[in-house]
Each structure stands twice: as C-alpha cells, then as structure tokens.
Amino acid sequence: MTKAYRPTREEVQAAAGRTVPDVIAPDLRVLFCGINPGLYTAAVGHHFARPGNRFWPALHLSGFTERRLSAFEERELLARGLGITNVVARATAAAAELSPEEFERGGRLLRAKVKRYRPRFLAVLGVGAYRAAFARPKASVGRQEEKLGAATVWVLPNPSGLNANYLPEDLARLFRELREAVEREL
C-alpha cells in the first residue's frame, strides 16, 4: 500500500502484536529507532503513521528532508541515507505495555542489526527506551558516550504527539543538532 490509508477502529485494535517492516539498508547515515509500533502504525504498516506523530515534521524542519514526507513515503528515506527500525517490534497501544525483558531483548537485537547494517549514527527516539534497552539509567537526550559497534549513538525525544514535554520546534531543533553532527562527521 503506497497511498495514505485510514484504518477503521476495528483494524487498529486488531493490529496488537503485529510488526512493521524495517526501512533499512547497509551503510546508512542515520538509522532512526522508535520504541515500538503503535496500533495505528501497525494497522497501516508504515512507521510513525498515526496522525499527530511529529517524526515526519521534525525530520523535514531539521533539514533531513527537503519536504515533509508522509509515513506512506517512508522508503524514500533510503535514498537519503536514512532508515527506521524499532527497539521492540511488537505493536502495542502504549509503550508502557512492554516488559523490561522485551526492552533488553530488543537492545540485543538492535546491537546485532547495527553490526550487520553499519549505520554511521543510531538515533533512538525515546530516552526511556534507550535506558531500558541498554541499561543506561542516567542517559539523557543527545549524543551518548558509548558507541554501538561503529555507530555513534544519539538519543532524541519520542516524537509521539502524546509526548507533551517537547514542542514541535524543540523536536526540530534536537533533530537539527543530530543532522549537523552527521554532516560534520561525513
């Protein structure tokens, strides 16, 4: 499905437990890593698809893309050296439904994925998810001291519209800081 699709309430509810395929290729500039797919995203099969999610606007306003893409255009990211994956693949209504064991397992799987695909940067979208997946309880937003394989690790806020701690302009600024770091290191 390549054009926008609005699922019914029943389709959204039925998406619990589904996965969304990664948008990934070897040697990306940045691999963005969400916490896990929400039900709306899983219902349509495209990352950050729920109306109100601020990932796509932040990506554009930060300069990663020349125009605002939609979730249904996610594969266009690959030509820009960008990709998307998740810490935990299982779709839930809320990240709070995920167990500590799922985060730990997701961290191990993410390490293997980064080793296999070799992105230059890994941007985890959610400080709590990063802390849980990599046993880094004091991690904060921004560049991390540790690398994951050869990838520089960067933590950004969760772009969900439910994350009221960050305004759209704050997200754009933080995404821009990552983009500028990526450009300096290329």
Image (cartoon, rainbow, N blue to C red):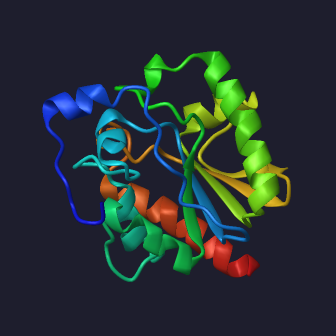
- 62 and 40: which one is in front? 40
| Residue depicted at x 28% and y 27% | 14
Q: Could you say where residue 145 lies in the image, as x and y percent from the top left?
A: 80, 49
**Residue extending farthest front:** 1
Q: Is residue 138 visible?
A: no
Residue 122's quadrant in the figure?
Answer: bottom right
Image quadrant for the C terminus?
A: bottom right
- Which residue: 34% across, 44% down? 41
Q: Using the rendered image of the protein, determine whether residue 80 is visible from the camera's viewpoint.
A: yes
Residue 59 at x, y percent in the picture: 42, 66
Q: Residue furthest right?
A: 149
144 vs 100, nearest the viewer: 100
Q: Report whether 129 appears left or right of 111.
A: left
Q: Is residue 73 above or below residue 21?
A: below
**Residue at 45%, 27% in the rendered image:** 95
Q: Is residue 161 above or below residue 65?
A: above
Task: Compare residues 137 and 75 and report the one nearer the observer.
Answer: 75
Q: Quadrant of the N terminus?
A: bottom left
Q: Position of residue 139 (x, y in %)?
A: 68, 37
